[in-house]
Image: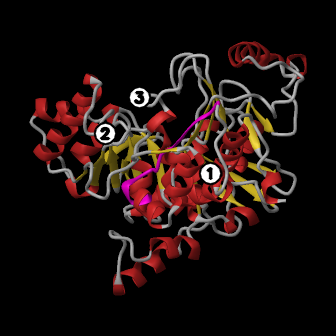
Amino acid sequence: MAKNIIEKIWDLHVVSEKEGQPAVFAIDLQLMHEVTSAQAFDELRQRGIKVAEPQHCVATIDHSIPTRKDRENIYDEKAKTQIVTLRNNCEEFGIPLLDLNSGKQGIVHVVGPEMGLTQPGMTIVCGDSHTATHGAFGAMAFGVGTTEVGHVLATGCILQKKPKTMRVNFNGALKPGVYAKDAALALIAKIGIGGANGHVIEYAGEAARKMSMEARMTVSNMSIECGARAGIFAPDQITYDYLKNKPHAPSGEEWDRAAQYWDSFVTDEGATFDLEVEIDLDRLDPMITWGTNPEQGMMIGENVPNISELPKTHRLVAEKALAYTGLKQGEPIEGTKIDWAFIGSCTNGRIEDFRVAAEILKGKKIAENVTCYLVPGSEAVKKQAEDEGLDKIFIEAGADWRMPGCSMCLGMNDDKVPGGMRCISSSNRNFVGRQGTGSITHLASPAMVAVSAIEGKIANPVKFFN
């Protein structure tokens, strides 16, 4: 029987399954951070349970850590406790920890791939909703709750219902100045924040096959924003070229055997999906959000929607969103004044993102009214950017080049947008107050963030490339 890639990975990891009940589902890798792991370790300690497979777990510090230069001086006592607790738990239970200044610390969904921990055909979980990022490698990766973190620590398995399957075909090609982030926002705007509920998405089509690994990670990362359980790309030569020589990737004869195994994780001809969606990228312009969830997005040249033209079920949410963001229905969003600009996060905090930003910012100056943070996703990304001289471009432009961490993606650390201020951000969520109490967030690609930071207002990056 023909199977899609999602069904293949599922079937290989089901330990046991009874009709009408969730399956016992094996997990190959658990990634951990300081926020969602403490209670899970406490449960093991109280029950006298050891970690079943500590070699299949890796922890890092990312959410709560400050990104200023003296980041080891943590002012927030709650954040300090979270970090100290993770260090103690990892030492006690034998979990490898990518600690500060190890050269390997960073956002959990950045360090996993760059170390070669993330590989095709694997099942990966983390107590973080954007675990879907790792699906870019042909892995089934999804976020779990703290209780499930404990289940995986104790048994290497979780209880899981078989997901529905969905294929998104990215047709055509991205124009200069349009990026994977725009493709992801276009999908979410089309199907909505619940459009993929209960599904794992396979991203396919001509444009998907041409995406770099970093672009694929951006798209997979945003899968959760349309309700998907996970997102996945079939592995190919682009995947293998990225993984080759990574610290935890196979080598020698093992590499050849692994690559042959990974080649099996493709959708068979004739396999079906529960749902298919087509996205035409030939006509796509840079995307930006206008509201308070990722579904409320539009192309930069469009006007903020008129509420009366929206489906009735969307109108109340739209009214509240516009009241919060201060935008006016029917008016252009391009040219809206901004106060802050942020490039970073597990969505767009990789070297490719900073190269794009540097290309735009070189020889330019950040507008006087704008505070601009550029935050690398890991210590490795930071070092590579500095080796390439990108940091000098950012600093000369007037931006703040910072230490690795989640930063102002979620305002769980020192990096917050002040209340009433408007930020254009390369992160993944524009919820009310996510970047700081009372802050206003517009999601966009790193290119649009960089151009907007220069102009001091929401601006179209395409003109830079013409």
Q: Which residue is drawn at 58% across and 73% down?
A: 238
Along the viewing direction, whichever of 401 and 376 lies nearer the viewer: 401
Q: Nearer the viewer, residue 52 or 384?
A: 384
What residue sits right under mark 2 in the picture?
A: 71
Q: Could you tell which of marks 3 and 2 lies nearer the N-terminus?
A: 2
Give yes or no for residue 354 being in the magenta stretch: no
Q: Quadrant of residue 281?
A: bottom right
Q: Which amino acid lies under the numbered mark 1 shown in the image of this protein?
A: Val
Q: Is residue 379 magenta?
A: yes
Which circle, 3 or 1, is nearer the viewer? 3
Q: Name the residue under label 3.
A: 412
Horizontal relation, residue 183 to residue 425: left or right: right
User: Which of the two discs, 3 and 2, sits closer to the camera?
Assistant: 2
Write the residue at 54% across / 68% down: 265
The residue range painted magenta reads 369-381
**Percent of width and height locating residue 169:** 74, 56
CB under 8 Å between discs 3 and 2: no
Q: Is mark 3 on a helix, strand or loop?
A: loop
Locate residue 40: give its quadrant: top left
Question: Foreground: 80 or 242?
Answer: 80
Q: In this view, does 387 lie above or below 244?
A: above
Colour mode of the rendering: secondary structure
- Quarter that holds the C terminus: bottom right
Mark 2 to mark 1: distance in Å? 30 Å
CB under 8 Å between callouts 3 and 1? no
Label 3 – label 2 distance at C-alpha: 14 Å
Q: Is residue 146 left or right of residue 387?
A: left
Q: Where is residue 223 in the image (x, y as percent from the top left)?
A: 60, 44
User: Callout 1: 10 Å neighbours few (<14), some, many (20+)?
Assistant: many
Looking at the rendered structure, the secondary structure element under dot 2 is loop
Label 1 belongs to which residue? 219
Q: Looking at the picture, which amino acid does disc 3 mark?
A: Met
